[in-house]
Image (cartoon, helix red, strand yellow):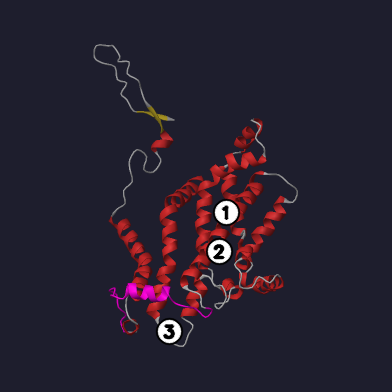
Amino acid sequence: MTISTASTATPAGGSRDDHPVHRTPLRNLLKPGAGRQQHGGPIAYAILTVIAIASLFPLYFAIVAASTSQTRIAQTPPPLVPGGNLFSNLRQVWNYNGPGGHTLGLAMFNSVVVAGAVTVSTVLFATLAGFAFAKLRFTGRNVLLVLVIATIAVPPQLSVLPLFQIISGLHWTDQLQSVILPGLVTAFGVFFMRQYLSEALPTELLEAARVDGANSWQIVWHVVFPVARPAMAVLGMLTFVQAWNDFLWPLIALTPAGNPTLQVALASIGGGYSINESIIMAGAVIATVPLLIVFAIFGKQIVGGVMQGAVKG
């Protein structure tokens, strides 16, 4: 059913104007917001403002705590206005020597290496596995997919002892590969990419590539990766944040006196007899900066990937 958007009345002289009649499908006119731009009302902006304040307040309070002294943090109520010791506290925590003589700069470098390697490998392997589960036909595919998804329900604490026995047998204690290897791919990443590619990648596109003579690797490089790029950006961001903030397994595999990551080094700063919360918060501010940089660089792609996935869903 269509609705005419131009008049078709006959003039008084009996002749009829031959103006084109533009018809718009009724279903398009019945869509919410069809033909007009949606604007939020005062209530929507008020709710978004409250959410923004609640999201940014922890970061703001961390900066406030990092810029004050230990005595001022212990006051009741706590300070809400930044002090003047931010740069001195940042310099002090950056030059801190841990139990093994390491600096925070070395620990941050270790975190960059670990988080970067885990992110690249997870995005690559999860995309390949997700493509295989979504578009390829092979024996035992459904059973294997169920087993992969089932591992999501297993608490990570259950794997600590077997993993530690493995890295001890390989003599990888206090070496970065002991943290990188267990995170090369995740079940969530495989499931996430499988769900996205099953909807976003048409089977006809793969068949057309095969008709044109493309082999499997050419199809993956020129067809699968371009289509999966938005989801890869989202998965990469989630994986990087998780690997950067990971604490339990690096604490076991990389001792504070050995070759720690940033989170383990920050824990060693606050693990002494005299705890200075302002120095600890200064370290937390330093640990947050790389995450903000990553989101500033890839934020547009990440938001676009989330929106595209929402539209396809």
Above or below, 121 relative to 21: below
Is residue 313 within the magenta segment?
no
Disc 3 residue type (three-letter): Ile
* Residue occupied by mark 1: 123
Residue in front for this viewpoint, 250 or 306: 250
Mark 1 or mark 3, which is nearer to you? 3
Assign a secondary structure to mark 2: helix
Q: Which residue is farthest left? A: 12
The percent coordinates of residue 169 (x first, y second) are: 72, 72
Mark 1–mark 3 distance (CA, rounded to whole Å): 39 Å
Identify the disc placed on residue 275: 3
The percent coordinates of residue 227 (x first, y second) are: 54, 43
Q: Residue at x 67, y 37 (%)?
A: 215
Identify the disc placed on residue 114: 2
The percent coordinates of residue 108 (x first, y second) are: 48, 67
User: Which is more N-terminal, label 3 or label 1?
Assistant: 1
What span is in magenta? 75-100
Mark 1–mark 2 distance (CA, rounded to whole Å): 14 Å
Is residue 81 within the magenta segment?
yes
Instruction: Give the tally of numbered discs.
Output: 3
